């Protein structure tokens, strides 16, 4: 069956530009010389030499006859002309390629391969063809700056091209010098503007950082005074301290608006990045002084949560037991963000009956995993089975409401005292033990700027368990802000609750 197609079915082909005029001018025309053709038909290698035009195809009258069905009856014609051999596709059904380039007509170089119908290769050699000039050869011949002289015999066309090039070259150089001068001035001006803008941005960031840590210092002072007021039991003073706390929250709201208005954090941030920084702020950290890899590190732990059903299961348990609101209210009453409930997630997955392993400090029990001494210090009664690794209904640590109130007091004390309002340092203390952390952080300056989790990490001896503990809590809180955004299929755990802390609202009594 013939594979020839009509013009309507013929695919569009590329015509190879005939970049031979320069070569002809350089080496002259003349006879093309013989063309040697090598091919294989049915496994039999063949070779022929041609001095005149010939045809390749399946038809009996083709000088180079091929039996492959991909080749048209009259597939291509090769013709000597102007000192070169040329190949022309005869509207074949499957096309012709010259050295892997689809062609309709092209000049054959000294050595080439024709591919007919993407199936049959024909090697052609034209020993008499002129050597194709390289870009360097062309540049030296036509665009040399020297004048013609002995040993530099050129034709009239070459000399004409040289003169034209020199004239155009002079005009372009003058034109480009002007453009370059203008560009240079613009670069200098834009560089100065960029420098000024960057300087202003850095000054704004420095100012914002100062404002933030000034607010944190006030917050630490308010928390300390509030602690003494609570011990006195004076309700009027307690109400006044609540008002002071609301004022601090309002300052933080104004600070957030300041960052937003001046775009200090940059509009390039993705929604995920913004949530990560927002959660860091909720935990009392300054988003402007975060380590460069903080966001990417939190994302790494978000990915770890995806590899386990623990987060989804724990959140479901929290909702089923009705713990969400009681934990949030307890934290809000102590001036803490409700996101601290994720500490209980990391400690026990919200399991009130959780029992830890036996340690030299005793056995940790309950949702907040209090050891006996800490539990008693915060008013929790330990049961008769305190020395046994079993749940005990007579142990207050297994009472979700009582244990949560004690946990809120404990977290608040760490936050307001040694941790200097650094939420991540609070988490590290809760896990590693306040005495372990206290020995280290008391060697730091007593201000929020110099005493925080990042400064603790610089000591180089924070256990990996504690590092993981902190980032698992932070990343869980980040996911909880918008579970769907981070690829989780559960509702926002704190929907309708955590918004209140942004305006400093008080939670009702439990």
Image (spheres, helix red, strand yellow):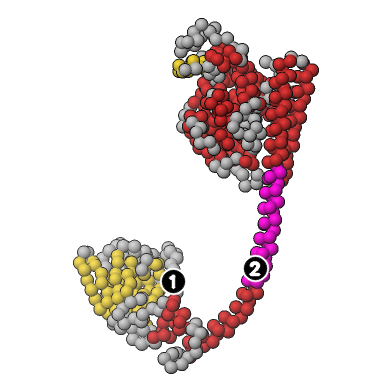
Q: Judge whether 131 appears above or below 403 on screen.
A: below
Quadrant in the rendering for residue 452: top right
| Label whose residue precedes the other's in the sequence (2 or 1) | 1
The nearer-to-camera label among 2 and 1 is 2
Residue 135's disc number: none
**Start and end of the magenta stretch?**
180-208
Q: Is residue 360 magenta?
A: no
Left/right placement of residue 468 relative to residue 88 reads right
User: Considering the numbered disc 2 on the image, is that residue within a helix, a strand or a loop?
Assistant: helix
The one nearer the camera, 201 or 305, is: 201
Residue 394 locus on image (x, y percent): 54, 7
The one nearer the camera, 52 or 217, is: 217
Residue 33 locus on image (x, y percent): 30, 83
Q: Judge whether 430 appears above or below 103 on screen.
A: above
Quadrant in the rendering for residue 382: top right
Q: Which residue is mark 2?
A: 184
Q: Which residue is mark 1?
A: 15
Which residue shows up at 25% across the image and 72% down it?
38
The one nearer the camera, 270 or 96, is: 270
Q: Judge whether 84 appears above or below 246 on screen.
A: below
- Residue farthest left in this picture: 44
Quadrant where the C terminus sits is top right
């Amino acid at each position: 069956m013939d594979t020839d197609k009509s013009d309507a079915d013929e695919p569009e082909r590329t015509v190879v530009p005939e970049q031979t005029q320069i070569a002809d001018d350089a080496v002259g025309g003349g006879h093309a010389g013989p063309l040697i053709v090598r091919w294989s038909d049915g496994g039999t290698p063949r070779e022929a030499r041609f001095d005149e035009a010939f045809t390749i195809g399946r038809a009996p009258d083709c000088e180079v006859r091929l039996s492959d069905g991909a080749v048209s009856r009259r597939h291509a014609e090769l013709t000597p002309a102007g000192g070169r051999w040329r190949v022309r596709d005869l509207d074949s059904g499957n096309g012709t390629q010259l050295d892997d380039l689809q062609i309709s007509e092209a000049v054959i170089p000294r050595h080439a391969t024709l591919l007919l119908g993407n199936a049959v290769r024909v090697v052609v050699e034209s020993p008499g063809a002129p050597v194709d000039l390289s870009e360097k050869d062309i540049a030296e011949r036509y665009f040399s700056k020297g004048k013609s002289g002995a040993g530099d015999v050129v034709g009239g066309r070459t000399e004409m091209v040289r003169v034209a090039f020199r004239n155009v070259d002079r005009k372009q150089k003058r034109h480009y010098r002007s453009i370059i001068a203008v560009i240079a001035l613009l670069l200098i001006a834009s560089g100065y503007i960029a420098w000024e803008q960057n300087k202003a941005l850095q000054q704004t960031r420095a100012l914002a950082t100062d404002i933030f840590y000034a607010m944190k210092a006030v917050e630490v002072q308010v928390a300390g005074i509030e602690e003494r007021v609570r011990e006195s039991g004076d309700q009027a003073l307690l109400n006044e301290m609540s008002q002071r706390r609301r004022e601090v929250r309002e300052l933080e709201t104004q600070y957030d608006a300041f960052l937003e208005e001046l775009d200090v954090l940059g509009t390039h941030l993705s929604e995920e990045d913004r949530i990560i920084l927002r959660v860091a702020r909720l935990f009392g950290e300054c988003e402007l002084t975060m380590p460069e890899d903080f966001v990417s590190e939190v994302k790494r732990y978000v990915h770890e949560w995806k590899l386990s059903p623990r987060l989804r299961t724990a959140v479901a348990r929290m909702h089923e037991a009705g713990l969400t609101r009681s934990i949030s209210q307890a934290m809000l009453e102590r001036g803490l963000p409700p996101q601290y409930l994720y500490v209980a997630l990391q400690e026990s997955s919200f399991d009130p009956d959780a029992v830890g392993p036996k340690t030299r400090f005793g056995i940790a029990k309950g949702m907040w995993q209090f050891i006996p001494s800490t539990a008693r210090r915060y008013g929790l009664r330990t049961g008769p089975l305190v020395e046994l690794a079993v749940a005990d209904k007579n142990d207050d640590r297994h009472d979700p409401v009582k244990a949560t109130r004690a946990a809120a007091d404990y977290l608040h004390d760490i936050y307001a005292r040694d941790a200097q309002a650094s939420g991540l340092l609070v988490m590290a203390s809760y896990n590693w033990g306040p005495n372990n952390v206290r020995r280290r952080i008391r060697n730091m300056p007593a201000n929020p700027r110099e005493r925080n989790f990042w400064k603790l990490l610089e000591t180089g001896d924070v256990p990996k368990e504690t590092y993981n503990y902190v980032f698992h809590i932070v990343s869980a809180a980040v996911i909880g802000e918008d579970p769907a955004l981070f690829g989780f299929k559960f509702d926002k755990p704190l929907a309708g609750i955590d918004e209140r802390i942004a305006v400093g609202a008080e939670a009702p009594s439990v």
